[in-house]
Image (cartoon, rainbow, N blue to C red):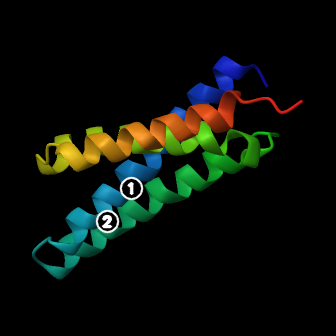
Amino acid sequence: MNPALAYLVLAIAAALEAGGDAIVRKGLHASGTPTRIGIFALGAAVLFAYGVTVNSPPWDFGKLLGIYVTLFFVVAQIVNLIFFGARPDLPIFVGGALIVAGGLVITFWRAS
């Protein structure tokens, strides 16, 4: 698979995973059982779409895990800001920098 296409698919998967988690969190705080069930069903569908997206391509997911974790972290912070209005604080930025650095090491370090 073309690396650019693989990164795009991983970014979509990260958006589905973080978005599905956010939808489920909204469902936990929804009022009324029918509303809660509907939100949970939507969250389950989005998380199922994530599973299909990340597992369908013929790739070695372990080799792409570094970039996926990095993409997931960034997307999760964006989703957290949009859905819940939570701005990242200093520990999130510092930890996030370590996550991004680790993802870059895993992705680009080629052992000889």
Q: Could you say where residue 68 lies in the image, as x and y percent from the top left?
A: 57, 41
Residue 44 sits above or below residue 10 on the image: below
- On the question of residue 15 being in view, the answer is no
Task: Identify the residue shown where x is 62% and y is 34%.
Answer: 105
Gap in angstroms between the C-alphas marked 2 and 1: 6 Å
Q: Is 46 situated above or below 36?
A: above
Mark carried by residue 20:
1
Q: Indicate left or right for 60 with 46 as reference.
A: right
- Report the residue that reaches farthest toward the right: 112
Q: Are marks 2 and 1 in contact (CB under 8 Å)?
A: yes
Q: Nearer the viewer, residue 98 or 35?
A: 98
Badge 2 amino acid:
Val
| Residue at 75% from the left image edge and 39% from the top image edge | 57
Q: Is residue 88 above or below residue 6?
A: below
Q: Secondary structure at mark 1?
A: helix
Drawn side of residue 90 relative to residue 7, left or right: left
Viewer-nearest residue: 64 or 98? 98
The residue pinned by badge 2 equals 24
- For the question of whether residue 70 can be seen, the reply is yes
Which residue is nearer to you in this view: 72 or 32?
72
Residue at position x 57%, y 26% from top?
A: 8
Of the 4 image quadrants, the one containing the N terminus is: top right
The residue at the point 46 percent across, 43 percent down is 99
Crowd rating for badge 2 (residues with CA inside 10 Å; few <14, some 14–19, many 20+): many
- How far from the left and from the top, in percent, is residue 66? 61, 41
